[in-house]
Each structure stands twice: as structure tokens, then as C-alpha cells.
Image (cartoon, rainbow, N blue to C red):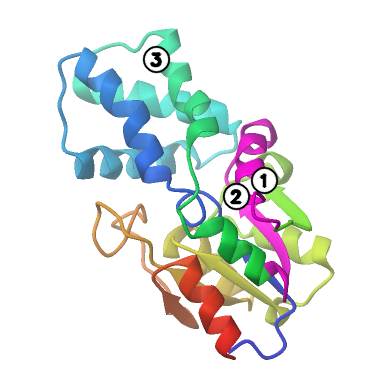
Amino acid sequence: MFQGIEAITFDCYGTLIDWEKGILRALRPMLVVHGKVLPDAEIVRLYAEFEAEEEREYKPYRDVLMNVVDRFAHHCGFEAEDRERERLPESIARWEPFPDTPKALAALGSRYRLAICSNIDDDLFQPTLAKLTAAGASFERVVTAQYCRSYKPDPRHFRVALALLGLAPHQVLHAAQSRYHDLAPAATLGMRTAWVNRPSVLDGRGMTPESASGTTPAVSVKSLEELAQVVEDK
């Protein structure tokens, strides 16, 4: 599985960062203020649907998230104020890594070159970077939607990452939670893939859109810690 692998690229939000918790903490209070109480699973399902629609054409991720808030407001029958629209993108700075992330990244970074492929703006990613590198890991490249001017599942993220790393697809493992955004397009290019199947309020698929067909990963794990252990055992 890992023979010939020189680098691991990672999706960030949902794989390294607990974005479901961050999203719920940002959106739930706004909905409650407007008298709308939705189950967590419904909030996450709607978020996945709205975000995918907003990412069909490139715009800054900050705008994507503000438009997602507008879509929630329209769905629930109210109009979001400017400060409410800004709350979701501003909350990213407070989204935390999964507990195993920093240490596992450090372990993986001792054996492989690491890179990020994320649907994010450069400035919104900066607070996250400090949290991911807290245990000593470093990323050789960070490929953002702002840099690519596109959003995954567009394969441009992966083409750019391969070019910047100077590696062939078969030399890179892409680790991610979303089969739709990450695993399918990476596999199409010939990259090997690892499904980091994090716990989700949407059992079995996380925020992968329901209509999306998945792909069969080379390896499936429940956490980054488990991926690091699989690597260690090889």
C-alpha cells in the first residue's frame, strides 16, 4: 500500500479539523435567535447541500460561507443580518483539530512530505495552520481554493499539489474524509487514497452529498492516529 509513497496530501476541514462541531456552534445559536430549532443532523445535511451549490463556480470562500448563511435564513423564513452572515467565516479561527490530529501529523511528517489541499481562503486558513503544527509537523505546500480559483471536487487542487511537490500521482497518498470532494477526484488522477472515516452526525457519509457516488479507497481508517499506526506497521 505505501510502497513508493513519498508524500501525503490531506484535506483539512472534516479530516484534520472537526468542522461539524465548528459549523454547529456557529449556526445553531443564530437559528435559535430566529426561533428555529433544527436537529444537528439536519443542520449538517443542509450545510453540505448549500455549500456544494455555492462552490459550483469560484468565489472567495468567505463569500461561499456568507451565502450559505443566507440560504439557511431563506430556508427557515428569515433574513440574516450582516453580522450573522459574517459569523460563520469568522468562526473558522475557533474550529479545533480532532484530538489525535497534531500528534499524528507529526508522526506522519517524520516519514513523508506533507501538504494540504483545502477548499479555503488563504487568510481564513492561517489560524488553523498554527493549530495543525502545534506538535511539530510542517507542511511543504498548502494548496487552497483561492490559489487554484476552484473548489474540490474539481481535480485542479490535486494537479497543482502534484506539480508543486514535483511528484507523480502514484507517489502521493491523499487522505480525506469526503469521498465526493477528495477521494474520487484524487483517485481519478492516479493518486492512492486513504479514507479517514471520522465520526459524523450523518452516519456513514459525513458531509458527502447524498447524490454523490463514492470511490473505493486503498485504505480505510477511523482516525489520523490509526493512519499513522498503519504507516508505522508497514
Which residue is more in the foreground, 65 or 125? Answer: 125
Q: Is residue 113 magenta?
A: yes
The range drawn in magenta is 109-136
Which residue is more in the foreground, 26 or 167? Answer: 26
Q: Which residue is mark 2?
A: 118
Q: Which residue is mark 1?
A: 144
Q: Which residue is mark 3?
A: 84
The amino acid at mark 1 is Thr
Image location (x, y in percent) of residue 199:
32, 59
Could you tell me which secondary element the residue under label 2 belongs to? strand
Which residue is more in the foreground, 69 or 105? Answer: 105
Q: Residues within 10 Å of mark 1 (few under 14, many from 20)?
A: many
Instruction: Answer whether labels 2 and 1 touch (C-beta < 8 Å).
Output: yes
Q: Is residue 167 visible?
A: yes
Is the C terminus in the top left, top right, bottom left or bottom right quadrant? Answer: bottom right
Drawn side of residue 176 relative to residue 3, left or right: left
Instruction: Answer whether labels 2 and 3 touch (C-beta < 8 Å).
Output: no
Residue 209: which quarter of the image? bottom left
Image location (x, y in percent) of residue 141:
76, 55
Q: Residue at x 29, y 42 (%)?
A: 44
The amino acid at mark 2 is Ser
Q: Is residue 121 visible?
A: no
Drawn side of residue 46 relative to residue 165, left or right: left
Image location (x, y in percent) of residue 80:
34, 12
Image location (x, y in percent) of residue 120:
59, 40
Could you tell me which secondary element the residue under label 1 belongs to? strand
User: Compared with residue 93, is residue 183 higher up or lower down, i.e. above or below?
Assistant: below
Q: Earlier in the sequence, mark 1 or mark 3?
A: 3
Q: Residue at x 58, y 82 (%)?
A: 231
User: Compared with residue 11, is residue 84 higher up or lower down, i.e. above or below?
Assistant: above
